[in-house]
Image (cartoon, grey):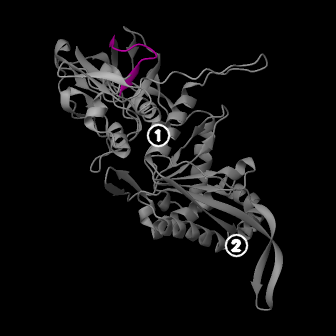
Amino acid sequence: MAKFELIMPKMGESIMEATILNWVKKVGDKISMDETILEIATDKVDSEIPSPVDGVLSEILYKENDVVEIGKVIAYIATEGEDEAPKASKEKKSKKPKKEEVQEPVQVEALEKPLVQKETVQLPSVQNGGRFYSPLVKNMAKTEGIGLEELSAIPGSGSKGRVTKKDMLQYIENRGKAPVSSSSNGHSVAKSISAPATPTTHFASGTDEIVQMDRMRKLIADHMVMSKHTSPHVTSFIEADVTDIVNWRNKNKKKFQEKFGEKITFTPIFMEAVVKAIKDFPLINVSVNDDQIIIKKDINIGMAAALPSGNLIVPVIKNADHLNLIGLTKSVNDLANRARANKLKPEEIQGGTFTLTNVGTFGNVMGTPIINQPQVAILAVGAIRKKPAVKETEYGDVIVIRQMMFLSLSYDHRVVDGFLGGSFLRRIGDYLEAFDASQEI
């Protein structure tokens, strides 16, 4: 019998850990290839993990509700064969050392920046004294002017005292409020750092209802805070005349569904304009790694989708520039339907390079969206409303009723300045206003 290592799979370039929700199979159970072994959850999606091989589940290394780093062995599957060394569920997996010699990898904070050359997340580096600091923590310390000596004195709540993003945010908020002593070379040294913040006491009246955040809401909250801390947000606005688009859709939506079996919404039309504008301004389609700008060659458009639970998820249309309006429509409808049914695959919510959110769905005319890290820009489209507008004609200016819509672009001012962000947004509006209303289905 050979041993096969079941590895916690990589769920996305910004995901470094996952929570085990449920072991579908127990030790001793026979398993067929592609049969579900366990269910896991990340901050993006819940997913079923299938078996890569036929065999028997011989050992489970982590229990339910454990948070496990990507790439760690979580179980062993006994398979038929003569090999004695464990095989890995990933290519080029190094031979597993003896159990007593295995060093515990340092837990890596989720949602950290990817490396430039590889689609992986940069691992923590060792600082003086053997303490680990993740790239996010080091970047936060650099931004706030926190030196190594001060950083080493910050209490860590992570594994083996590791400083986490939460610890840094808490420390920065309370920096300098309370002196804390720490030792250096065995001597007690007073430092002006804060003790862990005391939770604020909120008094609820008899009519208040207290609802605990679910797991996804907590992770979304962390992601939003991290994004605002990482990127200086700037938002620009334009108003576009989309009358031709509205009239064309009203005229052709029935015919479109009869011919292609799909409902045509405004979202794929907006995406088509976004893709064209990204081709004109490729520096919008980038991410940042420390002082390096990574220009993405693929145009992968994420679309923010509200779930029945009230939470948010962002499925991604890969290589959107390779799809025409029909292809975009099919992809949008498919991903939206499966997002609401919680049927998305892990690879369908990763790899986005730009995000579109439609706040008009909720009747809002505009919004200031938060950037979906590690991207550098996100577009919000508002509700389409009839408004009086001035239209230039050969006989002079006239006031007419037009279908108008606000568009807002939030962008990372570290790498996207006002000229680039404003020009890109205006180009999207230009493409929408130039929509060919005479095109046939």
| Badge 1 amino acid | Met
**Residue sitting farthest toward the top:** 28
- Tell which of 337 and 134 is nearer to you: 134
**Residue 226 bears which disc, if any?**
1
| Residue 298 as seen in the image, left or right of residue 92 | right
Q: Could you tell me which secondary element the residue under label 2 belongs to?
A: loop
Residue 307, magenta (yes or no):
no
User: Can I make out residue 348 in this image?
Assistant: no
What is the quadrant of residue 135 in the picture?
Answer: top left
Residue drawn at point x = 56 percent, y = 66 percent:
425
Q: Could you tell me which secondary element the residue under label 1 belongs to?
A: helix
Disc 2 versus disc 1: distance between alpha carbons?
42 Å
Residue 53 sits above or below residue 259 on the image: above
Q: Earlier in the sequence, mark 2 or mark 1?
A: 1
What is the quadrant of residue 293 in the picture?
Answer: bottom left
- Tell which of 117 and 235 is nearer to you: 235
Viewer-nearest of discs 2 and 1? 1
Instruction: Give the x, y percent position of residue 364.
Output: 73, 51
Residue 115 sits above or below residue 276 on the image: above
User: Can I make out residue 77 in this image?
Assistant: yes
Q: Which residues are magenta?
A: 59-69
Quarter the C terminus occupies: bottom right
Instruction: Give the x, y percent position of residue 187.
Output: 20, 20
Residue drawn at point x = 74 percent, y = 66 percent:
404
Residue drawn at point x = 43 percent, y = 47 percent:
374
**Residue 338 bears which disc, if any?**
none
Residue marked by disc 2: 437
Instruction: Give the x, y percent position of residue 388.
Output: 82, 71
| Badge 2 amino acid | Ala
- Badge 1 crowding class, 10 Å Cα cut-off, few under 14, some 14 to 19, many 20 or more, is some
- Tell which of 224 and 196 is nearer to you: 196
Mark 2 and mark 1 residues within 8 Å of each other at the beta carbon: no
